[in-house]
Amino acid sequence: MLSAEALLIVALILLNAFFVVAEFALVRVRATRLEELVQQQNWRARIAKHAQEHIDAYLNTVQVGITLASIGLGWVAEPWAAKQLQPLLTLFGVTSPRSVHLTAFLIGYLTITFLHVVIGEMVPKSIAIRCTEPAALWTAPPLNLFHRLLYPLTWLMTGCASLVLRLLRIPPASPEEAYSQEELRLLLASSRRSGALKDTEAELMEHVFSFGDKRAKDVMVPRVDMVYLSTTWSMEENLRVAEQYGFTRFPLCEGDPDKVIGIVHVKDLYRARQHGIDSLKHIARDCLIVPESKPIDELLREFQKQKMHMAIVVDEYGGTSGLVTIEDVIEEIVGEIYDEFEPVQPRIQKLGDNRYLVEANVELDELASQLGVQVSEEDGAFETVAGYVMGKLSSIPRVGDRVLLGEYEMQVVEMRGRRVHRVYVQPLQN
């Protein structure tokens, strides 16, 4: 039968283990999960939530509890272990009282320390990490009791600690926990690896992080690719353009894309023909004008506020740079959106054996990443493949012209007017 001292030693080790489990579980358990359990009338979760909302006070209680348990263990366990070992050492021929006492004390100290570290620290810590939610729920009620019992002592010690911090001019910690964007990215990556988030969900969240970094210029349709209607054309000519491209909305210009006077909805265009209206100015709607530098998160809010779907992007001189639609902005989060009539063709089309057919409006960094090549700081000034080709040639490109990109060769295979439309990319031949 175990003596009272042995039972006290076991109790102190288990008490230390309890405080360690409570500490790690309280720190690691998710507040959102506790809130969900509280809504389900879980009384343990309610206590755990209260502890987490007053985490400094409860962690002070835990620290005091661990300290008292450790001091008590050292005070009781080591002399008891030494006392139990003295007869055994005498049997092995250790007769000097001083040697017997010193050897028994050292062996007892190491044994109790081993049990304290393994059973009182490491095992409970692993339990709290692997079973965080159950550990938090089951330790919360007794921890709350200890918090009430030890409150006078923890209050005194907390006050002394706060005084020392004030003397050191260290500001108090904020009760609200906030994560930086990089910390959120790490949490997102960890959740993705563990399977808590699907790949599609993680990609959406990743797009949200970079959403505010982009500008209207980054997502707009360039001026040279704009399809517009003109007040200088006849109604039939404008209808042919609308039918050919099938868009819902078109910019209305006075002969020149720099003179955008409004937006025409295709339904209004057909109604105008039915009612014999020849001038598109009478059906044009207000047009939203934004600078190239406008962040797209602000642009999205502007679309929502103004109840508009299209904006004209202008440069620093007031000239038209391009147009941007609400769909262009949303695609930066959810990816490309296609309708049933829109042909789906990748902008970087792999032909096999590291050969690609690339649309020239692809960003140069995107192509370089696909090819696994580094873009020099000088070449980084070019935004698109078309700009890179034209910059390297220092002239208007022609079909058949070739330029180098790292270990690859790009050949112009299609032009539209004076603009590069497609290039063929292949590794350099030895």
Image (tube, rainbow, N blue to C red):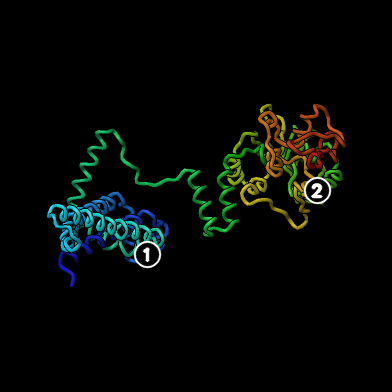
Whether residue 50 appears in this view of the structure is: no
Judged from the image, the secondary structure of the residue bearing numbered disc 1 is: helix
Judged from the image, the secondary structure of the residue bearing numbered disc 2 is: helix
Residue placed under numbered mark 2 in the picture = 245
Classify 39 as above or below 189.
below
Name the side, left or right, on which 285 lies relative to 99: right
Question: Which of these two is toward me, 48 or 343?
Answer: 48
Q: What is the crowding at mark 1: few (fewer than 14 residues within 10 Å), some, or many (at least 20)? A: some
How far apart are the two marked residues, 1 and 2, measured between alpha carbons? 60 Å
Question: Which of these two is toward me, 353 or 55?
Answer: 353
Residue sitting at x 22%, y 38%: 163
Q: Amino acid at mark 2?
A: Tyr
In the picture as drawn, the residue positioned furthest to the bottom comes out as 1
Residue placed under numbered mark 1 in the picture = 134
Whole-percent x and y of residue 215? 62, 38
Q: Amino acid at mark 1?
A: Pro
Classify 129 as above or below 430.
below
